[in-house]
Amino acid sequence: MKENYIVSARKYRPSTFATVIGQNALTHTLKTAIASGKLAHAYLFCGPRGVGKTTCARIFAKAINCEHMGADGEPCNQCESCIAFNEQRSYNIVELDAASNNSVDDIRGITDQVRIPPQVGRYRVFIIDEVHMLSSQAFNAFLKTLEEPPEYAIFILATTEKQKIIPTILSRCQIYDFARITVPDIVAQLQYVANDRGVKAESAALNVIAQKADGAMRDALSIFDQVSASSEGNITYQSTIENLNVLDHDYYFRLDEAFLAGDVPSTLLIFKEIRDHGFDAQFFINGLAQHLRDLMMASSPRTASLLEMNDDVAQRYVLQAAKFTPQFYYKAMDLCNTCDLNYRDASNKQFLVELTLIKIVQLIAAPAQPAASAPAVKKIQPAATSQPATTAPASKAPEVKPAAQPKPQPAAPVQAAAPAQPAAPAQPSHAQPDEQPPHPAEAFMPKQTAQPTCRSANHAPRVMVNVHMDADNPSAPAAGNKAETHANNQSFTNEQLLDAWQAYIDQHPHEHLVINTMRTSKPNRLTDTQLEITVQNIGQVNFINNALPHILDFLRNKLANDAITIDIKLDESMPAPKILTERELIEDIKTRRPEFNDFLEDFKLTLT
Ligand SMILES: [Zn+2]
């Protein structure tokens, strides 16, 4: 075994339909067709990578040429033809990988071959892998052959991207859709391979490998080999997660407990621990999303079957799942999703994830928030600003106005983005010397929010306005334009809108005139999808107008809402407010709110 080691993906490649994993219905249909002799001239095998498309194509070619084919349509694997197939020396099978051979000449190599009848056996089978990669000229050259194939020729086209196959090809093929292989199916096969190789393997370890393989048996076997090589014949859960750099799901279960306790500091410390182990923040947030998704599935017997894991792991999820409400799962998953979407564009990624975690804790800590709109934004506000958790947003709203926008301007929309700027220099004089800032950690603890220490009210909303750049800034006359939940198309929050707006700016650095205007003129929401921006001169009207189709495309795509429109409004009375970058904004918060700095220090957090 040592000197002649064959990788598992090859050694355990199925040689009969019966040994193909996870495609039972499909292989049954194929076998029936073969056994009854009802063969088509062209087949299209579709599905993700590593699920057995090429394998089935080869078994198919072997079976229809087999000299002693079984009544069930399986090849005998013993006759001369089968042996020639298994030793890869049969002339009756021709394979072309169109991923790397997609020219007209390449396809001509195949069509020339098609004219040669089989010397032995009955059929010649032509397998074109990744057929969607063929150039359009190659496609056309191939189409002629496909339209009038000789009696003995059978084509099996395989693709991971069915939607890229042109209709003229689709209409000439029998189509077979291969499914992703389920985790339990992969685990069972890995267990078989482990036994066959004389390797001990914990089922939780095989579960990790199967999940990592994401439905592809070939990948699962390669990963198995890798883990097996470093585990010296004993594959444990611990050795597997270390080898594969998989995050131990214990971290997520610990986070659950911190969420339940409303314990923000613990949450952030666990996140730090995870980062210290070298895990990327986005990887973590996606892992958390998956964990929450699994918990939600586990919370109902009806959806427990959707858990992709083996039974002992699933049992733990079922027990844990009962501790949360469905509402929590929906909102927490949504927060993770938003974080993931914004991740690439965020200049401070760690901060984004921390903010998301804090919002998740707040879902449990402050469930009775009356705010109907943008609940996550509202909920974080009381905790971060030490205001009583029960404060209704309405009572706070008027306070924002004097502090954030000393000189309210007639044109409201653009102001929402820049309220902090004018107030910043005056900040030191607002600070009360006798004012006792809460302990930095406590400031984030919902249980401490009702403490009597009353901070000056005009400090408080600024953080909210800055961080979230809320468009429902009460200083705007059109304060009714709140983020609300919409039924039509995909709804989006003001925060997401501004993120998308910023993303356009970030991704089009060379469109100076346009993005400079976009920086100073943030969109205001007139209705769910009708946006308005106010610009200061006719030049800006033109810049935006010219780029409008682009911007609209981008926003509609980014926010998944095709109904978005933008009105451009000219307002010459508007002063040009300076818009802070996210970086400047955080620096600004740090300067004006020293306790935020202390907080970072206390927990050894850094803003990168
Ligand atoms: Zn045979």
Image (tube, rainbow, N blue to C red):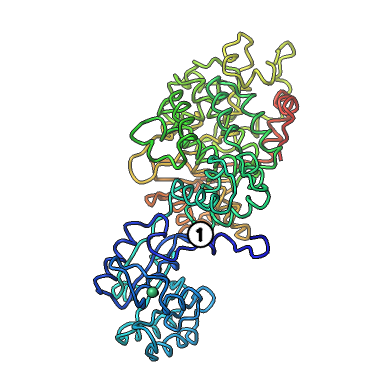
Q: Is residue 229 left or right of residue 540?
A: right
Residue 54 figure quarter: bottom left
* Location of residue 249 by image quarter: top right
Q: Residue visible at 42% across and 56% down?
A: 21
Establish if 177 lies above or below 478: below
Q: Mark 1 and ligand 1: say if the CB distance to the nearest ligand atom is below 8 Å.
A: no
356 relative to 509, above or below: above
Type of amino acid at the residue the image marks with label 1: Ala
**As rendered, which of 244 and 38 lies closer to the eye?**
38
**Residue 354 appears in which quarter of the rendering?**
top right
Front position in the image: 583 or 176: 176
x, y percentage for residue 602? 74, 24
Asked if residue 206 is positioned above or below residue 288 in the image, the reply reads below
**Number of labelled discs?**
1
Q: Quadrant of the N terminus?
A: bottom right
Q: Residues within 10 Å of mark 1 (few under 14, many from 20)?
A: few
How far from the left and from the top, in percent, is residue 247? 61, 40
Would residue 502 be visible to someone looking at this image?
Answer: yes
- Classify mark 1: helix, strand or loop: helix
- Is 236 positioned to the left or the right of 19 in the image? right
User: Image point 49% across, 87% down: which residue?
Assistant: 105
Residue placed farthest to the top in the image?
452
Which percent across, then down, holds residue 43?
Answer: 34, 72
Q: Nearer the viewer, residue 505 or 76?
A: 76
The image quadrant where one finds ligand 1 is bottom left
- Residue 359: x and y in percent read 54, 29
In the image, residue 483 above or below residue 459: below
Q: Which residue is mark 1?
A: 547
Q: The C terminus lies in which quarter of the figure? A: top right
Whether residue 581 appears in this view of the structure is: no
